[in-house]
Image: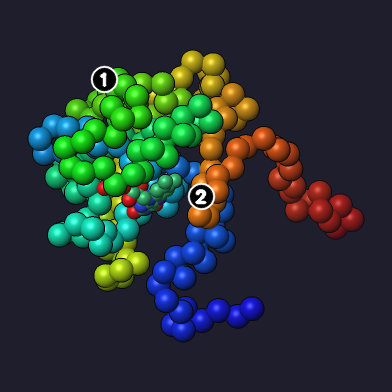
Amino acid sequence: MEIRPTEHQVTDLYKLIIGCVVPRPIAWVTSLAENGRVNLAPFSFFNGVCSNPPTVSISFSWNPGSDDHLKDTWRNIRARGEFVVNMVDEAHAERMNLTSADFPPGESELEYAGLETAAPATGATPRIAGAPVCFECSLAHSVDVGEGAGSATLVLGTVRHVYVADGLIDDRLRVDVHALRPVGRLAGAQYCRVRDVFEMPRPSYADLRPEE
Ligand SMILES: Cc1cc2nc3c(=O)[nH]c(=O)nc-3n(C[C@H](O)[C@H](O)[C@H](O)COP(=O)(O)O)c2cc1C
């Protein structure tokens, strides 16, 4: 099937992207509202960007449900200049999903999901207590991509501190994925676990063409 984006609805193109770009890691983001309330929501248009400086990216979709069309998380990050990405493991998957509901302003997703926060090492935005990995980030760049429904703002955050729970990492910062038990996001209501890990050492050209 050949697909020309200009011939399709934005909503269908969204389904196409989230169905093909899989699995996606999930950033479970804590941010601070103007009144100091902690906001928590998941975002799977999320990835690592580079390591010098350590940087992550998140893309916040245009929000038809608010006057300024911003998700609360992005509005908070813009105002405060900081946020925390908490990684989602199997133990937190259901509670992560609860926090994606459209809670009215003033009602706490954290309280509803029975989650507690822990003090960050830097800045003012707390991390989720019990989350296996937390990246404390400063807003570095934002790029608006498109306009209106289906558009987004791509945000880059500089990681200024990383928390990793004991037992998941060694002295050389190598993380044990079997102990981490991350959850990935697929399309619709589908998620995946990382249970079927296989290894493929990267070959050198000399290994591939030994006769030359
Ligand atoms: C697993 C998962 C991944 C999501 N990924 C994104 C995303 O990448 N970008 C986005 O704008 N919304 C995403 N959403 C929807 C937001 O979580 C949802 O709109 C949430 O209510 C936003 O909260 P906020 O307004 O407090 O920021 C995702 C939802 C789920 C359950």
State the SS at label 2: loop
Res. 48 image quadrant: top left
Work out whether residue 74 or residue 209 is closer to the camera in this orientation and state it.
74
In the rendered view, would you say 209 is above or below 122?
below
- In the displayed structure, would residue 182 be above or below residue 166? below
Residue placed farthest to the right in the image?
Answer: 211
Locate the C terminus and report the quarter of the image it occupies. bottom right
Left-right relation of 20 to 82: right
Residue 140 in sight in this render:
no
Task: Give the CA separation, mark 1 to mark 2.
Answer: 32 Å
Say which quarter of the image contains residue 52: top left
Residue displayed at 60% across by 38% down: 193
Callout 2 environment at 10 Å: few (<14), some (14 to 19), or many (20+)?
few
* Picture colour scheme: rainbow
Q: Are marks 1 and 2 in contact (CB under 8 Å)?
A: no
Q: Residue furthest top?
A: 166
Name the residue furthest left: 35
Query: SS of the residue at dot 1?
Result: loop
Q: Is residue 190 visible?
A: yes
Query: Which residue, given by chain and number where applicable, does mark 1 sit on?
Result: 119
Q: Is residue 124 left or right of residue 154?
A: left
Please give left or right for residue 157 compared with residue 69 in the image: right
Q: Which residue is mark 2?
A: 189
Q: Disc 1 residue type? A: Ala
